[in-house]
Image (tube, rainbow, N blue to C red):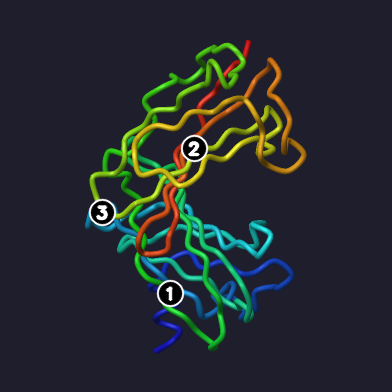
Amino acid sequence: MKRDLALAIGVTAVLSGCSPDFRDGTGPIVPVPNVEGAVTRSGSVAPGLLVSLRDSTSQDVAKTVTNASGNYGFGNVASGAWEVKVSGRDPGDYDSVTRAFQLVSPSLTLPMLDVSAHGAGPTNPADGAAHAVPTPVQPLVFQFNFPSAPPGVIAHAQVFDSGGKAVWFSGALKIGESAWNGLGNQGGYQGTVATPGSYTWRLKFDLPDSSAAKTAPRGLTLT
């Protein structure tokens, strides 16, 4: 019964450090998934999407792909803090949707994830736009659309340097814009004034079901 379930899930990942068992002449034995879930796109099944299992440091530990029914599964997952990340593929998808979870019991079925952005996304500045280094007098205003569903979404604008290190995160936003005065508030950029160079910015949406969604980064040049 469990073996049939594992095969129905499709591609099931084995955690790094573990090796699949083999049967003579039949190939690898697929481990029975003990963490499972499903992905939809606006209520329809979402097959063929990459799903990553990540540890508490956000490092990928295993990967799989949703099957024809939008289901995925991971085997040999140990107890502890984990996160699943689903990568969008269609133009109307989020770049990624994540859900953090704690595995306590031997197995867990996670709530469904919706990869559809429902119209959410950045509007200004455009990808690759140039802007003067922001200041309190001349801030850089990020503008965006909230998703049409579900209600109760909270947004954050985020800026990163050319190496992907966090520079600035906005507070919780309930309107579709946020002004940055050029002062960093993350990591080594805390309290540091932005300098000319290449950056990226994106949006993070905290969804009411405790999942989080992110848009694809947009290039930004500060001059």
Query: How far separated are the C-alphas under marks 2 and 1?
Result: 41 Å
Query: Toward the viewer: 188 or 30?
Result: 188
Q: Position of residue 81 (x, y in %)?
A: 61, 72
Q: Secondary structure at mark 1?
A: helix
Q: Position of residue 179 (x, y in %)?
A: 48, 28
Q: How dense is the environment of label 1, judged by Cα within 10 Å: few (below 14), some, or many (20 and up)?
A: some
Numbered tag placed on residue 49 in the rendering? none
Q: Secondary structure at mark 2?
A: strand
Numbered tag placed on residue 151 in the rendering? 3
Numbered tag placed on residue 7 in the rendering? 1
Query: Toward the viewer: 189 or 211?
Result: 189
On screen, residue 32 versus residue 39, left or right, reads right
Tell me if residue 16 comes above or below residue 97 in the rendering: below
First along the sequence among labels 2 and 1:
1
Q: Residue furthest right?
A: 188
Query: How far separated are the C-alphas under marks 3 and 2?
Result: 19 Å
Q: How dense is the environment of label 3, judged by Cα within 10 Å: few (below 14), some, or many (20 and up)?
A: few
Residue type at mark 3?
Answer: Pro
* Residue at the image point whose x is 36% and y is 61% from the top: 113
* Residue at the image point whose x is 55% and y is 76% from the top: 102
On screen, residue 91 versus residue 171, left or right, reads left
Q: Position of residue 4 (x, y in %)?
A: 40, 82
* Residue at the image point whose x is 43% and y is 49% from the top: 213
On screen, residue 132 versus residue 91, left or right, reads right
Tell me if residue 50 comes above or below residue 130 in the rendering: below
Q: Secondary structure at mark 3?
A: loop
Query: Toward the viewer: 43 or 127?
Result: 127
Tell me if residue 30 comes above or below residue 187 in the rendering: below
Residue bearing the label numbered 2: 157
